[in-house]
Amino acid sequence: MRMLLLIFSLTVAVIAAEMDAPVLVNLGPKSNGVGTSWQIALNACVGLANLNSPSSVYSLGTSDMSLDYIWLSELDGFVPAKEDTSIFFKTCFADYAKGYVLYDYATQKALIPNVLTYAAVAGAIPINKAVVDDFELGDMELVQDLTHYPQRGGWRGMGALEVTEKMWEEYKGDTTGLCMMNPGYQFNNGTDLHPPLNNDPDPNLVDFIFSRRLFTMYLPNQCNPAFPRQHAVMSTIATENEWPKPIPVYGYDDTDPVLGGDMFEAETNCVEEGNMGQVATKGVNNLAYWGGKVEEDGDLQLQQNDEKDLVYDPNKTYVALVVGDGDNINMLKGRNYVWWQARRRRCAEKGVADDLRCFPLVWTISSQLVELHPRLLQYYYEGAKETGKDYFILPPSGSLYSYPSMMSDSVQEEYARTIVSDFAALDTRCSVHWEWFYSWGGEKGALATYFPRFSAVAGPGDALGFFLTNVPYPIPIEQFDSSEDFKIIAPSPDSRALVLFKPHVWRGTDTSNAERVLDPAYSSPARMADKINGLPPGSVTHIYLTSDGGATIDSVYDLVVELGEEVMIVSAGQLVDIALQKAGV
């Protein structure tokens, strides 16, 4: 199997040898104030360059530059020398930018998302007026000085709400999608409804914003009905547009943090229409570069590892180990790379029993990579062929991080079709699924309305599997009896069956505070293994692992060592089939 990765790497190297290496620019480390405004301008140039000449300029981001080097080498075969950034700016100003836009970082920080929208639509570079003399602008045209008063076309004295309204009225038809970018509000776990603007925006996604001309915005209470004017603007933007539904929202919405999470991060519950979902891309650079590979590489042909047919044994306990957070693109290019390398090393170890060395492991991975970063997707699938025991399913909740039961009927049906299409593209039939605790039951709940749609739109074929998580996760889904591992939805003998697995969350191993000590989702590997070993014979379940509680890939291996002989680790598809056998379907 190692040969498959070698072939992939050699193919990339051959392609690279036939192409010019991209220009390499360095955004520099995380900065503040003047430094951040410089990074914004530079990354805007990167976006415009890749828009005009696909995959021509590559950046080293502000967080982990070593990984940016690794990915360029692994996926594109290039290890270029560092480029003089001042030279790139001159090229950008001469060849790519249609002008520049001035703003004041110090006094207009809350408006930076709006500045990015304005400049992206104009194809212009946003430049902080305080440092404009540091740029060699030559004869480049000044498109607008936004530090002027409104009478002269500027935004001086205007707030983010007023500017967002103005931008939407004037430019909604010139943008291709929606992006949330926090300009620096510092939230305090939901206790401050008027958060201070103490931090700085993350500039890494700016290249993508410019390459896609995204409508970028951020109002600190945009999803909160208690702030009617902000919420009305958000509702207008979510409904009066020609974008696909549900709307993919790039960036990240960290407004209204509550109980350790962000109330509206999935976006679906942000407005009454429930027609949005998140593509978690905060902190991700180079999407403008990698997106340019879609046309170059053509259609992806992704194939999962084979799943051996199993016969249900009522004396065994069946469990699928599911690695979460695959909806977060930054984790896929960061944390997952580290975990993936460890997994490959473990699977290649000598002198270790197969069932302890390279057991089946299920990874969630975003179908958004098909368009955003196809080579990253291909990299993981080719790597899975090396181990022979790694599998992929969609993350919560399918194509977008979302709560689908909150969507309207028409949007739900379209979303179900999209997920079925993504199942085919990723060669899978399973997904993690999240809903708010009050959205599962009732005649409009997920169990009665959303999931049955798949039987209608998917057509005949193998059963689909959904691994459920309640929001908030500690609350059980009341529609499941304590003795139930799963539910089956099969409207008719001729329709596609669905298996819905009861939540079983493992958030990590860190029990350093009292709340986590009492929370079974925070457990040591040995304690989690005791729970699995203590299940009734014949149980069919899964563990959904996230790293926000300190878990690592080593935690998974430490768990497996402690499992009893009666426990069988299986893939997601195998778990679906075993559940059907147990139920006699």
Image (tube, rainbow, N blue to C red):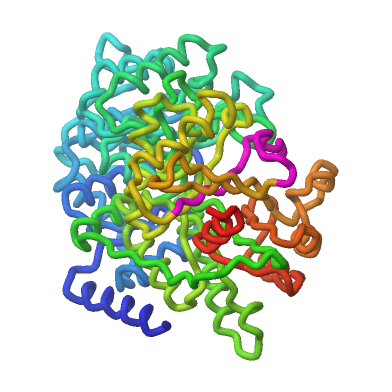
Image: 249 above or below 419: above
The stretch drawn in magenta includes residue 577? no
Q: Main secondary structure of the magenta part?
A: loop
Q: In front: 435, or 151?
A: 435
Image: 125 above or below 504: above
Is residue 15 shown left or right of residue 467? Answer: left
Question: Residue placed farthest to the bottom in the image?
Answer: 351
Image: 382 above or below 321: below
Give the residue drawn at x 16%, y 33%: 141
Q: In front: 147, or 170?
A: 170
Give the residue drawn at x 82%, y 46%: 513
**Residue 475 visible here:** yes
Is residue 182 shown left or right of residue 194? Answer: left
Quadrant assignment for the N terminus: bottom left
Image location (x, y in percent) of residue 505 = 67, 49
Image: 565 above or below 128: below
Q: Which residues are magenta?
A: 463-483
Q: Quadrant of residue 71?
A: bottom left
Give the residue drawn at x 40%, y 41%: 454
Image location (x, y in percent) of residue 498 = 48, 47
Is residue 170 shown left or right of residue 421? Answer: left
Q: In front: 122, or 347?
A: 347
The stretch drawn in magenta includes residue 466? yes
Image location (x, y in percent) of residue 112 = 40, 30
